[in-house]
Structures are given as structure tokens and as C-alpha cells.
Amino acid sequence: MIAKTRHIPDGKKELKALPIEHYLDSEYLYYPVTNARCPEGETCVIGGQFVKVGEIIGTRKGAFFEQPMHATASGEVKGYEKHIDQSGKLVDCLIVKNDFKYELHESIKDRTDEEIDALTREDYVEITKEAGLVGLGGSAFPTYIKLQTKDPIDTVIANGVECEPYLIADYGLTMTNPLPILEGLIYAMKASNAKHGIIAIKKKYNELYERLSFCVRQYEHLDIKIVKVGNYYPQGWELEVIKNTTGIKIPHGELLSKYGILNFNVSTLASIYAAVKHRLPVLERLFTISGDGVHNKSFRARIGTSIPKLIELAGGYKDPEIPKVLILGGPMMGVNATDDSIVMTHTTTSLIVMNDKPEKEEPCIHCASCVYSCPVDIQPIQIMNAYKAKDKEMIQTLDVNKCIECGLCAYVCPSKIQLTEYMRKAKTYLRK
Ligand code: SF4
Ligand code: SF4
């Protein structure tokens, strides 16, 4: 039987009800020197040096951009250790020992409303670049690159859909602190000269709608709408959210700006607000621990916090003897981590800890469910076969690069074939 899947259990009901515990006083902070987008990096501080909150401590270097690293606590540089970052890989991390004084670097001071009114598009680009802002929903795409487009922009979208199961960071931020999101949206509209703003949320989140409506009413002179979109997966994918909020269908692979659109995750917009108004980089974020192998807990924690400390605060592993599967991010698009020596980065939204129940991959039964469920209309099973045959030409012909790694093909497969993993491997193989 063919199963075309769009509605998957999201596991968020219980998580949304959790109180958010603030854990902002980690004794040591660990800052990865590299990340998935920036395979190189260097620090500009030495052991024993005193650093302040917001001070630049290094630079990560990618193929087309650089990202400054900032201290998120004041204290003493202690050297390096290897820890796991958001990509699930072991990387070098700079250590700062917190002095718990949180002394701000001299560069951190508020802008007045007059100063903000006078900012040009170039200023916004520079501000977001200097603050090292990236897509906080998980993409880690540099924010300044979106803002520096020369294309005329009509609409900025605040994407608060967060369709991935078990992720509630955007939901938590919008419920507890919606104003910075709205201010960030307004700044992004000013920076790009956009006339319209749209905040996209799921239809079922009436409480978010109420909260946001109350805030939007304070800005009646601006055209900002809250648009409810479907509860299915992957509704948060940018092309899907744009289609369902503006009616514009953007072909896969095209720049959104060519169609007059900029799309930002809501947490990213809040970070734009902090960078513009307070000259702050991202210092902290919301993070959730969930899964059947651990006690569920939501935190607000400082970037650089050691995740094992948060697991301990959540009550530890339920049964430490049972082997665990650790997933960073959501179950559909997240990545596996080999152990829990993970540190919090800008894009660390969630850790799922599952008691390991090994699932044996069975042969394909040719049900075509993976093909019918794929939102970008490619053929996962054919791509997997082409990858196994090391047939580069066929992988290219089958358009593997259209894959958004949404995880639906693997989710729907009755034979438990890890199709999404094969899509990742096929993409990597094409690049070789
Ligand atoms: S992971 Fe890729 S191939 Fe699989 S359903 Fe999603 S987009 Fe399609
Ligand atoms: S890979 Fe799985 S979902 Fe796809 S056709 Fe085979 S059995 Fe069906």
C-alpha cells in the first residue's frame, strides 16, 4: 500500500507545557572554532587572557563568508578541548572560565531610536555581519548575506512554523518574548525597504496568534500580518511557507529575493533586534532535551554551555545501562551524535535521547511510499540504488541536490531503510 505522508506526530504537546529553566551560569563555556559551514577557523586570544561578554575571540572561515566568534561570559581563556558541535562532529573548542561578573565589552552599548532611524541597508548588513548572526532555526546561513541582496524586496517573512517534531524553541521564544521578534521583523523590513511583513505560524497555535496579535496592534501603521498555515510537515520549509503565505511559487534552487521575498526564522529576527538595538551577538538560546531515554526539560542557556550539565540538571539518563541514540535537532532532519560531550552553539535547538532499539533494514518492497511522500518530487529509492552502484551520472540525473533532507522518505519506509542518510551520502559523493 502506498503511504503518502505529510501528517506526522509532532510530540510537542508535553514539551510545550514544560517550564523553561534558566541555566546561564555555566562555570566553563566552550566555543567551537569551526562548524559545518566554516570548516576552518582561528582564535585571537591566548591562554590566561581575560575576555568580556561580546568580545571577539576568533573567526570561523567558510567558503564564502567569515563568522566572528564572541565570548558569552566574561572570564579567563583556559585553552582548548575537543567537543561535539551541532554537526555531530568532534571539533576544537576554545574554553573560557566564567568569572560570573558578566562584564560587557566596550563595544556593547545601546543604539538610540534616532541612531536606528538613520541606519542604511549597508549599516544593517555590517551590523549583522559583525554580530556573527546566522539562521537560528538550524540552517546557520549568514543573515547579512540575505540582507545585502540588491533585488527589490516586497515582503519579509518571519517564519515561526517550526514543523519539525519535538522542536519548541521558536514556540517558546514567541510565547515568552514576542516583541524582539516583531522589532527584528521591522528592522529587516527597514533594511530591505520591504512594504509588507508576514508572521507565519501553525493554524493550531491559537495561543501564539493571540499573543502576536496583541503585539502587532501596537504597529498599526505598518503592514504586518499574522498568517496561519497548515499543520503538516514540512510546512516550515521556506518554499512551502512562502507559497502558503503569499501565493508565490518559487521554483526549487531559485533565490527568494528574485521574487521579492526574504524569509527569516523568528529566533533569527530576535537576534537581529538584539544586534541592532543593543549591539549584542547571540548570547543565549532556548534548548530542549526530550526522548524516552531522558527526563524532558526546557532550558534557556548560554551559548557555549556544556550539554551534559543540562542533561544532569534534567535528572540524567533514565536508564544509563541502556545504550542511547543521541539526535541533535529534530528526528526528521537532525544529526546523530556519537556521544554526549556536546556544546551549545547558535543552532542547538534540541537533543533527543532515545533508548537504542536497533531496527533492522529490510529489503525494499517497491511500495513507492518514499516517492509519493517526497515534497520535492524526487525518487529516493532510485537515488539510493544509483549511490550504491556508484553511478554519478544517474545520481545527477535523479536530481539529488533538490533533496531538502526533510526525512519523510525514511520515516514512511516500511522496510526501515535509512533513505535520508543515503541522500546525504549521494550528495557528498557527487561533490567528490
Ligand atoms: S529527505 Fe529528500 S528525498 Fe527524502 S523525502 Fe525529503 S526531500 Fe525527498
Ligand atoms: S525504499 Fe521503502 S518506501 Fe521506498 S519503495 Fe522501497 S520499501 Fe517503499
Image (cartoon, rainbow, N blue to C red):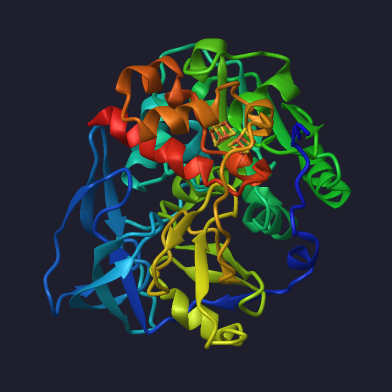
| Residue drawn at the location 60% of the way across and 49% of the way down | 416
Q: How far across and how far down the image is residue 192, in percent?
A: 51, 23
Work out which quarter of the rendered image holds the C terminus and state it: top left
Considering only vertical position in the picture, is 302 above or below 201?
below
Would residue 304 appear left or right of 193 to someone viewing this image? Answer: left
The quarter of the picture showing ligand 1: top right
Q: Is residue 181 visible?
A: yes
Considering only vertical position in the picture, is 223 above or below 166?
above
Q: How far across and how far down the image is residue 141, in percent?
A: 41, 38
Quadrant in which residue 32 is drawn: bottom left
Number of residue marks:
0
| Residue drawn at the location 54% of the way across and 47% of the way down | 333
Quadrant in which residue 377 is drawn: top right
Q: Nearer the viewer, residue 160 or 85?
A: 85
| Residue drawn at the location 44% of the way across and 25% of the way down | 400
Work out which quarter of the rendered image holds the N terminus and state it: top right
Q: Nearer the viewer, residue 308 or 269?
A: 308
